[in-house]
Image: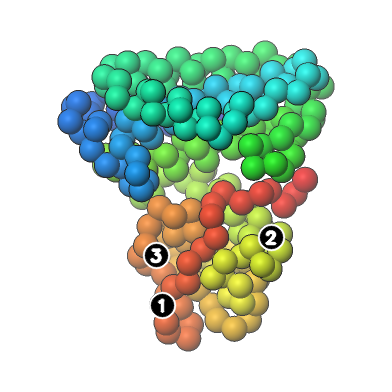
Amino acid sequence: MSEWRKVLAEVDAGTERIVATVAGLGEEELRAPSALPGWTRGHVATHIARNADSLWNLLEWARTGEEIPQYPSLDARNADLEAGAGRPARVLADDVRATAERFSAQAEALPEEAWQAPVRAMPGWSHPAWFTVYRRWHEVEAHHVDLAAGYGPADWPVTYVEWALTCTLADLEGLPEGLRGGLAGYKLVATDTGDTADLGDAAEIAGGGRALLAWLSGRSEGEGLITRPEGLLPAPPPWPHAPSGF
């Protein structure tokens, strides 16, 4: 928890990069497909903004002690995306910045004792309020890639890769075997950092940590990775995973 202020600064910097990307897109570019199936770039930008609002809700839950769901419902979340996706670039960029600033202000003002308060993610798993800032870091970096507008895993800050890879591998090990998707039975190895996830000893998938994170997060097809014995890469489970440390 002591690191959350540093992480919030990373999140704020990542948000400014997204704002610059969105503001630089033309209207036709914003209506074009993103890297996420069925979503335009306008959908992705809107989601980034509404996610900040949803995580603000969890911090407000921690502050007041009164339960506030991350989103009212999945249908409400999807309706907001559809309603906002067609807005002009300037409006989308302003929305991303304003909602991010609101989230950061809430985090800065949260009483110290509230950071340990349990809150609940939309999928149903619980975590302490401080992890909300880390969840936002995932959203900012991963969805910037999803805009498919020149920002990719190679542009992720080293600090993000180091944290996200370590957590992703630990969380994979914490998943029940039936939820590990095609990774069940594999050992994952980051050849540059030595980080591993031991999901079995039938085969190994190895590569640089950045390449491994990009693939496990669904932001690459697995470029730069190898399997031993040689074969096709399996399909990883949906990411991010429920955190294993709480």
Q: Amino acid at mark 1?
A: Leu
13 displayed left or right of 25: right
Residue under the image location 71 percent in, 63 percent down = 176
Which dot marks residue 160? none
- Percent across and percent down for residue 94 are 37, 16
Is residue 119 something that shows in the picture?
A: yes
Closer to the chain start, of discs 2 and 1, is: 2
Q: Secondary structure at mark 3?
A: loop
Tag 1 residue: 232
- Percent across and percent down for residue 132 are 64, 32
Which dot marks residue 175? 2
The part of the image, by quadrant, that contains residue 121 is top right
Q: Do labels 3 and 1 touch, CB within 8 Å?
A: no
Q: Amino acid at mark 2?
A: Leu
Label 3 to label 2: alpha-carbon separation: 21 Å
Tag 3 residue: 222
Is residue 12 something that shows in the picture?
A: no
Q: Quadrant of the N terminus?
A: top right
Q: Which color scheme does this rendered protein use?
A: rainbow
Residue under the image location 32 percent in, 30 percent down = 42
Q: Secondary structure at mark 1?
A: loop
Q: Do labels 2 and 1 touch, CB within 8 Å?
A: no
- Percent across and percent down for residue 152 are 34, 47
Residue under the image location 24 percent in, 33 percent down = 31
Q: Secondary structure at mark 2?
A: loop
Label 3 to label 1: alpha-carbon separation: 10 Å
- Percent across and percent down for residue 62 are 75, 23
Residue 103 vs residue 6, the one in the foreground: 103
Label 2 to label 1: alpha-carbon separation: 23 Å
Q: Amino acid at mark 3?
A: Gly
Within 10 Å of the Cα at label 1, are there few (<14), some (14-19), or many (20+) other Cα atoms?
A: few
